[in-house]
Image (spheres, rainbow, N blue to C red):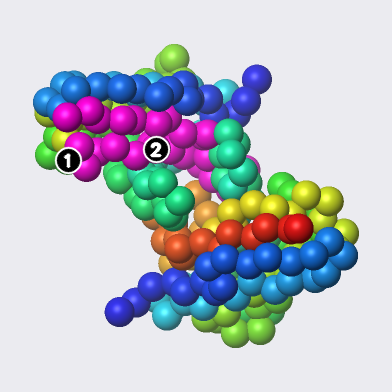
Amino acid sequence: RKEVEQDPGPFNVPEGATVAFNCTYSNSASQSFFWYRQDCRKEPKLLMSVYSSGNEDGRFTAQLNRASQYISLLIRDSKLSDSATYLCVVGGATNKLIFGTGTLLAVQP
Amino acid sequence: DGGITQSPKYLFRKEGQNVTLSCEQNLNHDAMYWYRQDPGQGLRLIYYSQIVNDFQKGDIAEGYSVSREKKESFPLTVTSAQKNPTAFYLCASNPRALNTGELFFGEGSRLTVL
């Protein structure tokens, strides 16, 4: 089993739609969680950290479920500019970050 | 502007040749990292350094070497011993330690072995 697993997609959604991605992690001792965004052939950039209480940044909401060992990212009112690959990143007691393979989102006009 | 600069962006090399990828940061970050990204795989850690003159192997260090003689510089050498060097290489930094916050990435270096 991979340490961090994501559905690779692609998720094809129309503008204005709500879309959600899940990411599961295998190490129950994991302590930090992030969502990064990566545009095609570009470097990843931090989208948001994921806190135990959940957090929201505009149209984006991230949640953590420790019992089931997954994190989620919800995007409301999708824009064309949201089209990208979304990387789930988990950090743990081993003092390293584990990157998921990413979920590709394509927002259609 | 502060940031991380990688060069070259694109590089072609013949089999059997060593190549060095440059990574420079002016963010005054202590920690620097090299990742490799292949299609369908997550980023994999090659080497990291948390302080000048010190570095540690990541998950896939074989066939690579690094140095950290200055805080702002962390070059990566892809040696001829690396069996499958064609990949997208990303350098990153953060102020403190690996799993404690945001990684700042350079724009990447795309290496193709002919």
Find residue B22 and report its horizontal and vertical position in percent. Answer: 60, 75
- Of badges 2 and 1, nearer the viewer stands 2
Return the residue nearer the eye: B14 or B60: B14
At 31% from the left edge and 30% from the top edge, which residue is drawn? A106
Disc 2 is attached to a residue of which chain? A
At 51% from the left edge and 61% from the top edge, which residue is drawn? B108
Mark 1 Cα shell of 10 Å, populated few (<14), some (14-19), many (≥20): few
At 87% from the left edge and 59% from the top edge, which residue is drawn? B81
Q: Which residues are magenta?
A: A80-109
The disc label shown at residue A19, or none: none
Q: Which residue is mark 1?
A: A57
Residue A35 lies in the magenta-colored region: no
Exactly how many numbered labels are in the figure?
Answer: 2
Distance (Cα) linking label 2 and label 1: 18 Å
Does mark 1 fall on the same chain as mark 2? Answer: yes
* SS for callout 2: strand
The reply, left or right, for residue B84 in relation to residue A74 is right
Asked if residue B104 can be seen in this view, the reply is: yes
Q: Amino acid at mark 1?
A: Asp
Q: Which residue is mark 2?
A: A85
The reply, left or right, for residue B108 in relation to residue A62 is right
Q: Amino acid at mark 2?
A: Thr
Vertical order, A42 against A19 (above or below):
below
At 37% from the left edge and 52% from the top edge, which residue is drawn? A45
